[in-house]
Image (cartoon, rainbow, N blue to C red):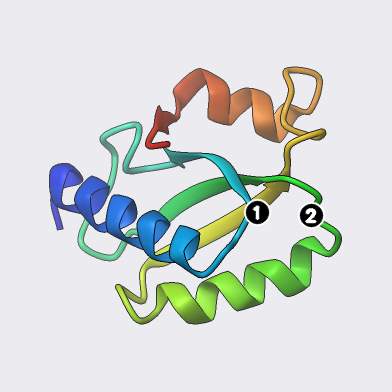
Amino acid sequence: MDKETALKLLKNYIVFLKTKKYNIKSAYLFGSYAKDKYDEDSDIDLAIIMKNLENNYEMQVELMILGSKFDSRIEPHPIDETDFNSTYPFAYEIMKTGIKIL
């Protein structure tokens, strides 16, 4: 899958999640697709910034199940909006190299 197709897929996935009432503030494509270093086996890393996220692990599993309906390579990474700042190394990397979708 090329990068443009992956971006369209993720946009559709985010729209779907918003219709399910997930409190999504923003979303970023990051990792190999954002850096143009992907291949046919690469996962599609998606940071999903959410308001009032209580359990990252449970939410990640839930989002992965929903994402598999679109493409099994979607790898959602939920992050609470209060943690999404430049002092958090994972968030900093996403801000620096990611592509904002929402």
Residue type at mark 2 is: Leu
Residue 84 point in image, percent of width and height: 72, 31
Residue 70 point in image, percent of width and height: 30, 74
Q: Earlier in the sequence, mark 1 or mark 2?
A: 2
Instruction: Decide if residue 54 is on the left or right side of residue 45.
Output: right
Whether residue 68 is visible: yes
Of the pair 53 and 6, the residue shown nearer to us: 53
For the N terminus, the image quarter is: bottom left
10 Å neighbourhood of mark 2: few (<14), some, or many (≥20)?
some
Residue that mark 1 sits on: 78
Q: Nearer the viewer, mark 1 or mark 2?
A: 2
Instruction: Decide if residue 86 is on the left or right side of residue 29.
Output: right
Tell me if residue 16 comes above or below residue 58 in the rendering: above
For the C terminus, the image quarter is: top left
Whether residue 43 is visible: no
Tell me if residue 72 comes above or below residue 34 in the rendering: below
Residue 90 point in image, percent of width and height: 69, 35
Residue that mark 2 sits on: 53
Residue at left 31%, top 50%? 11
Residue at left 20%, top 62%? 40
Q: Which disc is residue 94 wearing?
A: none
> Would you say the residues marked 1 and 2 are in contact, meaning their CB atoms lie under 8 Å apart?
yes
Q: Quadrant of residue 61?
A: bottom right
